[in-house]
Image (spheres, rainbow, N blue to C red):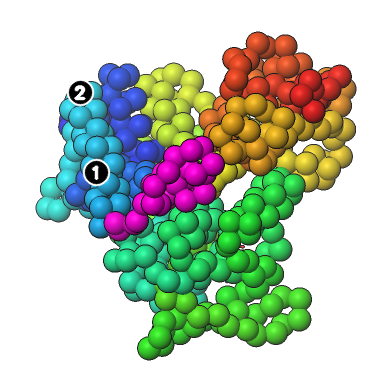
């Protein structure tokens, strides 16, 4: 008789959410986690600590750039790096302990240690083998290394090391202008480091709407970040004075180099599945090293997988939604994730957020669409808080007015995007948003005006 209905391996956002939902639906559930604290990469060395540093450094930026204009006098604050790190740790502790509390409240067992799967229906942790009806792999991802570059997490770091540097470096080279590169690069720029981002492609944040890509790069340049685009990093050599990053320009094959005290390697992540014993079990994998699934089921009976370990965007909220959907499937319900409405947010300042199709995708599909755009310059609230840079862009079907996608760069973009997400879930037309009364003065009025711009036109531009 198995001791559990479900054992979930990994307590990140995918695993812990799946566990809580399983328990809520009456399944006897345990989670195996080898880290000292629950919450996975997101809570311990990812989303949450980086948001603490973003908040702290943005506050510094406000003090340095906008306080005087608002009549707030006094010397600009100095950075006490040790205290900023302590604040970040408090934020992590509060969040990870919160998951522990939720596990106790929902009667989810935490099996401490690293799991392997000797056979279907068995999870081995240390010397103990636990029997279970179902196993869910939610082991997430790890930074993918670049050949020829050795990470020491001291001066050549991944996002993990970058969150806990011993001091603020004078200079930093960021390899990769993806989400991590832009977020952490801008943190260190605000702290006073000289930051150069080297990117293989010709645009930052791959996959985002082209107009947004150009705008975010322009804004970050204005904040002092330097960009070398179309450059493939070849090697990083550690010297006495720092690290020499060599790259080759794609347009002419010319080799160049730049030196920096710290190098952040932010060139993507890959599924983390080593040590589970998947090969011996005969688990099918995709060509990109992900666990192959169909409705989260692997080819091995009773073995499921969710989150970064399977296909799709590597996002905490995508993993969470998969965790909920799988729990519902395991409880005999109809779990479902709408992959067409998964928002993406980059937490730079200003924030960047998007959902649904980009203009480039719609053009490629040959779909007739219209664009409704509104600048935050026309939004009273944004102007009052020095946040008039940026815009809301809504893409709607040319004949039905149905919203196909939205792209926002500006204040609270990561929150504003959800109005569009809800609208898209309900199959909303841009006119539905345009006819909805929005509180004044709020940033959300810019979303309404962009929706109006899909029709007769906005009021404030
Ligand atoms: P990414 O895939 O977003 O960006 C990596 C970038 O590195 C790409 O633009 C790529 O062209 C570039 N690159 C690769 N090799 C290179 C080379 N040799 N030289 C120069 N450039 C090179 O990956 P990133 O930023 O490391 O993030 C990893 C994952 O974590 C992503 O899936 C991301 O979505 C997720 N994440 C999401 C966050 C959010 O939602 N706010 C925050 C942090 C991470």
State left or right for residue 123 relative to residue 48.
Answer: left
Q: Is residue 69 magenta?
A: yes
User: Which region is colored magenta?
Assistant: 53-81
Q: Residue at x 30, y 58 (%)?
A: 81
Point out the residue furthest to the bottom here. 240
State left or right for residue 246 relative to residue 10.
Answer: right
Q: Residue at x 55, y 80 (%)?
A: 258
The numbered dot on residue 332 is none
**Real-space CA distance between mark 1 and mark 2, rounded to the nearest whole angstrom:** 22 Å
Q: Check disc 1 and report the residue beneath it.
A: 90
Q: Check disc 2 and report the residue beneath it.
A: 105
Q: Residue at x 45, y 84 (%)?
A: 237
The quarter of the picture where residue 303 lies is top left
Q: Is residue 297 magenta?
A: no
Q: Quadrant of the C terminus?
A: top right
**Comparing labels 1 and 2, the label whose residue is closer to the camera:** 1
């Amino acid at each position: 008789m198995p001791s559990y209905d479900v054992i979930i391996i990994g307590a990140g956002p995918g695993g812990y959410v799946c566990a809580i939902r399983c328990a809520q639906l009456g399944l006897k559930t345990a989670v195996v986690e080898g880290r000292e604290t629950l919450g996975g990469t997101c809570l311990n060395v990812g989303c949450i600590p980086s948001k603490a540093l973003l908040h702290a450094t943005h506050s510094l930026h406000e003090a340095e750039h906008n306080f005087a204009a608002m009549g707030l006098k006094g010397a600009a604050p100095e950075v006490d790096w040790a205290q900023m790190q302590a604040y970040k740790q408090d934020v992590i502790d509060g969040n990870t302990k919160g998951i522990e509390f939720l596990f106790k409240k929902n009667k989810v067992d935490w099996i401490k240690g690293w799991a392997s799967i000797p056979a279907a229906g068995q999870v081995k942790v240390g010397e103990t083998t636990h029997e279970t009806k179902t196993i869910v792999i939610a082991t997430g991802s790890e930074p993918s290394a670049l050949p020829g570059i050795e990470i020491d997490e001291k001066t050549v770091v991944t996002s993990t090391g970058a969150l806990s540097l011993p001091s603020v470096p004078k200079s930093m080279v960021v390899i990769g202008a993806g989400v991590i590169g832009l977020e952490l690069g801008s943190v260190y720029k605000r702290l006073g480091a000289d930051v150069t981002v080297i990117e293989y492609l010709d645009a930052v944040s791959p996959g985002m709407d082209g107009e947004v890509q150009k705008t975010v790069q322009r804004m970050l340049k204005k904040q002092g970040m330097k960009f070398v685009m179309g450059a493939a990093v070849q090697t990083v050599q550690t010297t006495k004075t720092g690290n020499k990053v060599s790259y080759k320009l794609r347009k002419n094959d010319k080799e160049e180099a730049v030196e920096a005290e710290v190098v952040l390697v932010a060139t993507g992540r890959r599924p983390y599945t080593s040590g589970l014993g998947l090969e011996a079990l005969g688990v099918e994998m995709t060509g990109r090293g992900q666990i192959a699934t169909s409705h989260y089921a692997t080819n091995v009976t009773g073995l499921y997988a969710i989150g970064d370990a399977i296909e799709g965007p590597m996002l905490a909220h995508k993993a969470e939604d998969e965790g909920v959907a799988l729990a519902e499937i395991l409880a005999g319900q109809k779990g479902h994730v709408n992959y067409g409405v998964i928002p993406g947010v980059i937490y730079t300042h200003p924030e960047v957020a998007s959902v649904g199709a980009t203009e480039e995708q719609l053009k490629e599909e040959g779909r007739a669409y219209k664009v409704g755009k509104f600048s935050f310059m026309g939004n009273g609230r944004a102007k009052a808080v020095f946040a008039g840079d940026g815009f809301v862009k809504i893409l709607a079907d040319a004949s039905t007015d149905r919203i196909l996608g939205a792209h926002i760069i500006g204040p609270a973009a990561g929150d504003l995007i959800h109005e569009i997400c809800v609208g898209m879930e309900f199959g909303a037309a841009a006119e539905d948003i345009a006819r909805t009364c929005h509180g004044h003065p709020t940033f959300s009025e810019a979303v309404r005006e962009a929706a109006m711009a899909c029709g007769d036109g906005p009021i404030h531009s």
